Image (cartoon, rainbow, N blue to C red):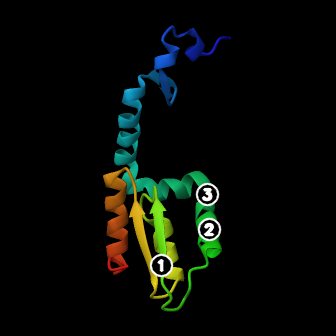
């Protein structure tokens, strides 16, 4: 069987999104829509899809970062940080010298992350 991309005479200008072909310039917008739609449920979805394993992976990552529990300065830049899950774990484990900046392409994911950060009273970190 010939893959759909090989059958498409415009295969050099098509890409996939899920199980369908889309124009490359459409793909990022579709990805953005997915994250905008799931942002409020993203953490729950991770729990369900990984059977909670993502929590262990994130805890292991933070342990490897070894944030100091002292006043010593420690800065984390979390790129594609979404709902700030890793940043919050690092701030909880580290001391008062820990700071985190979370970046993400999705404003909706960042909104959820900001809400979580503010709920813990950590917006200054």
**Please, is residue 93 above or below residue 51 in the view?**
below
> Is 48 on the left or on the right of 13, as rendered?
right
- Residue carrying label 3: 51
> Which residue bears the numbered disc 2?
61
Question: Quarter of the image holding residue 103?
Answer: bottom left
How far apart in space, not on screen, are marks 3 and 1 (Cα)? 24 Å
Q: Are marks 2 and 3 in contact (CB under 8 Å)?
A: no
Quarter of the picture containing the N terminus is: top right
Relative vertical location of residue 112 with respect to residue 120 in this rendering, above or below: above
Q: Which of 111 and 94 is in front in this view?
A: 94
**Mark 1 residue element:** helix
Whichever of labels 2 and 1 marks the residue nearer the N terminus, that label is 2
- Which residue is the extreme one toward the right? 1
Q: In which quarter of the image is the C terminus?
A: bottom left
Question: What is the distance, in whole Å, between disc 2 and disc 1 at their CAs?
Answer: 13 Å
N-term mark: 3 or 1:
3
Q: In the picture provided, is 87 more to the left or to the right than 112?
A: right
As displayed, is residue 45 above or below residue 98?
above
- Label 1: which residue? 91
Could you say where residue 99 lies in the image, as x and y percent from the top left? 43, 77
């Amino acid at each position: 069987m010939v893959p759909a991309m090989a059958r498409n005479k415009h295969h050099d200008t098509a890409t996939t999104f899920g199980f369908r072909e889309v124009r490359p310039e459409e793909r990022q917008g579709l990805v953005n829509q997915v994250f905008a739609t799931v942002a409020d449920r993203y953490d729950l979805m991770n729990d369900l899809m990984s059977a909670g394993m993502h929590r262990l992976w994130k805890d292991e990552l933070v342990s490897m970062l070894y944030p100091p529990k002292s006043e010593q300065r420690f800065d984390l830049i979390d790129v594609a940080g979404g709902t700030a899950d890793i940043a919050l774990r690092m701030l909880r484990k580290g001391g008062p010298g820990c700071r985190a900046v979370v970046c993400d392409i999705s404003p909706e994911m960042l909104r959820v992350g900001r809400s979580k950060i503010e709920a813990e009273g950590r917006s200054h970190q």
